[in-house]
Amino acid sequence: MRPKLVRPILLITAAFLLTACQFSQPAVTPTLLFPSPTPFQPLPLTPTRTPTPTDTPTTTPTPTSTATSTPTETPTPTDLPTSKPLPTEPPEEEEPTATIGDYGSVTVPILLYHHISDTVSTEYSVHTDQFEEQMKWLSDRGYTSVNISDVSRAIVAGEDLPDRPVVITFDDGYLDVYQNAYPILENYGFFATFFIIGDTVDTRGNLSAEQLQELVNHGWEIGCHSMHHSYLTSGYNLEEEIVGSKVLLESKIGDPVQTFAYPYGLTNATVTNYTINAGYTSAVGLGSIMTHSTSTLFFLHRKEIKSWYTLDFFDQFMPWK
């Protein structure tokens, strides 16, 4: 045989033998680089057990805290410190409001009028018949008139006051007070404290020195209402307004002038100190308080009686009915 034909025959023979060997061996499952999924085989179910309180719970992520602040707990009434027991002593009693004649404190209503006239039409003018009704109301209910100096002595020295005292005051020095109010007060056994503006004495429409002296002789008290009815809190000319007016009135009536009325009811520390140093024993302003004490001796409250006030006001305001 030719050598060139031997090699192809040998190659064909070898290939045939290899093929025969493959068919004679058992089949082998080839290994795949990406195996296909195996058919689903359900596992036996294990029942889920509810955790008991003793079980350790599965750790869960802690939620991020928010900015909401925890409110401060309000202590209850029982949250009292045990080291400081509650006081067992009863509270102090309040100062009585209707004690008369007790040293240091007295209750006296102080009324303030200006005009008593049937012709003057202002809020500060009370008609004559209206004024008489008011004085009758006081008389029927047992009120007794006293002066400002009486109240001052009751506070400072403990002097007794009558039952149901009342102070009736007038400001400025108008002649109609002498003409209209004075006779009515005389009829009911009352008198008043008259605060006079110094430079009005002996002038038209105001009282004369002789008329002021007559009132003093019938139990009235003359007080000072400054020299010109100026705003004293401005600090202007206090010497003349407070001291000079006192000297003038004392020369007119022949009696000491002991009490002062602040114009417009206004004062301050300077004016009050000037009033004290001038020799007055008390002073009056405006207000509704009826219990007076050493702390208010130089600002005793007076209630203004306006033109429209009826007897209903007296029923409501006055302390003794």
Image: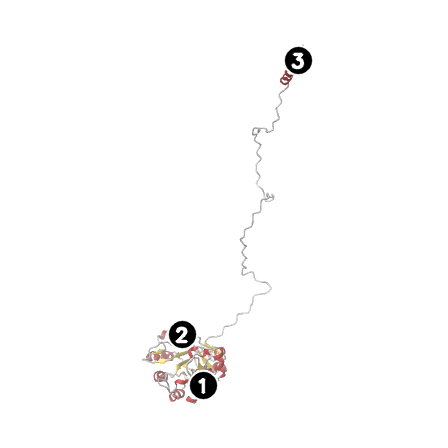
Q: Give SS at disc 3.
A: helix
- Per the image, the residue denoted by label 1 is 244
Q: Give SS at disc 2.
A: helix
Q: Position of residue 4 (x, y in %)?
A: 66, 13
Quarter holding the C terminus? bottom left
Residue 239 vs residue 53, the one in the foreground: 239
Q: Position of residue 258 (x, y in %)?
A: 46, 84
Q: Which mark is residue 45?
A: none
- Per the image, the residue denoted by label 2 is 317
Task: Name which of mark 2 and mark 1 comes first in the sequence.
Answer: 1
Residue 203 vs residue 319, the one in the foreground: 203
Q: Label 3 is placed on what type of residue?
A: Lys
Residue 199 vs residue 147, the one in the foreground: 199
Residue found at the very far top of the displayed protein: 1
Left-right relation of 281 to 176: right
Task: Name which of mark 3 and mark 2 comes first in the sequence.
Answer: 3
- Per the image, the residue denoted by label 3 is 4
Q: Is residue 109 visible from the viewing direction of this image?
A: no
Q: Residue at x 38, y 74 (%)?
A: 313
Task: Name which of mark 1 and mark 3 comes first in the sequence.
Answer: 3
Instruction: Determine whether 72 is above or below 319 in the image.
Output: above
Q: In which quarter of the view is residue 300 placed?
A: bottom left
Q: In which quarter of the view is residue 287 placed?
A: bottom left
Q: Label 1 is placed on what type of residue?
A: Gly
How crowded pointer 3 is (Cα within 10 Å; few <14, some 14-19, many 20+) is rated as few
Quarter holding the N terminus? top right
